[in-house]
Image: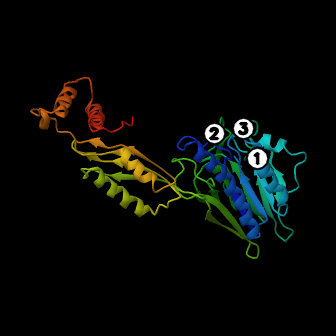
Amino acid sequence: MKIIHCADIHLDSKMTSNLDGEKAKERKYEILSTFLEMISYAKTEEIKHIIIAGDLFDTNTFSAATRNSVKDAIISNNEINYYFIKGNHGGGDRFLESFDEIPENLHLFGEEWKSYTLNDDNFKIKIFGIELNDSNIGTVYSSLMLDPRDINIVTMHGQINEYQNSKKAEIISLNDLRNKNINYLALGHVHEYQKGELPPRGQYCYCGCLEGRGFDECGKHGFVVIDVNESEQTCSSEFIPFAKRNLYEISVDISDCVSTPDIKEKIKNAIESQKCKEKDLVKIVLIGEISLDCEKNTEHLTKYLMEQFYYAKIKDKTKIAVDYNDFELDASLKGEFVRLIKTQEELSEEEKAEIIKCGFQVLNGEEIEL
């Protein structure tokens, strides 16, 4: 038996932190589309169970079109059972309120542990879940009782920690979940794929989000397929990359560059090594120490990248390698500027270097990125 584990879809995220209005709308739709395509994948692969481990919606505010698309996907695919944790971002209650009657294939969890049995064989495959809050934080672990003869899948939404935090319901204690006969702990809240051992017989797993939304969510995204071998009574899992677009943040050391074409070549090589595709979003972080005479036009470089990718940006974190003695007798405007900054005793060497960097960007006709 196979089961999909997904989480942190964050439908109707604004997507405006990097993208313009048109592309933000497009990415918002793409997140919904990826979710619906995941359901189509389940149908094609004859997977009858989908765990949604929290934060299906980004906030309590979402469009009627998005709401109705999700409702229709659940109702019209009634051969698939959905196991729904609301999570901590809101929207879950409002979504459920939109149903006149909760469909039989949409299975919910409450403030106490609830379980669903997936089969009628000699041993049971069960999905357990709970909505974490301040009222159940003191009993959530002691009240979880699992039969060691069963395959036990437990779903929760929160941040794992080695030990329980009595003041934060969203903290999940791995130590208190050990030796609980858990085969697979299906987690939501962390937006990247992570997994680890949960002794003595199981593993915990964050499936991550379906689509990266910003450059704090780089890397591959998708969902996890849990595979229960009923003849051997074992449980394994596989991550399925599924996002329409990937996000990359790539650091490029330009210490030995003297011009924009030099920097462009460095960026090109770094992008090729990451195998970025035209549909992706790319952030280049320029690092290293460059000379004062280095000609660096970040606006030109950004336009070059935007012609290749869905979205691209450049963050300049380079430092100026300054030997002030080189400008003691320099009669140029740059020399006068460096000598002026050198006399500012209230500034640290790091602050002087940053001011000189910005000053030279202005003198070179570049935009300053603070």
Q: Depth check: 64 or 246 in front?
A: 64
Viewer can see residue 179: no
Residue hosting label 3: 61
Rendered location of residue 22, percent (x, y): 59, 45
Under mark 3, the amino acid is Thr
> Decide: marks 3, 1 in contact (CB < 8 A)?
no
Report the front residue among 27 and 61: 27
Rendered position, 92 above or below 282: above
Could you classify mark 1 by the number of other residues whose Cα lies within 10 Å: few (under 14), some (14-19), or many (20 or more)?
A: few
Residue plotted at (76% across, 40% down): 136
The residue lying at 9 percent from left, 33 percent from top is 329
- The image position of residue 69, as x and y in percent, is 77, 51
327 sits to left or right of 180: left
For mark 1, what is the residue? 65
Res. 4 image quadrant: bottom right
Q: What's the residue at 53%, 58% (across, down)? A: 279
Mark 3 or 2: the one toward you = 3
Q: Which residue lies furthest to the left in this view?
A: 329
**Quadrant of the image containing the N terminus:** bottom right
Task: Name the foreground residue: 19 vs 231.
Answer: 19
Q: Is residue 142 left or right of residue 165?
A: right
Residue annotated with mark 2: 165
Which sits earlier in the primary sequence, circle 3 or circle 2?
Answer: 3
Residue 81 left/right relative to 15: right
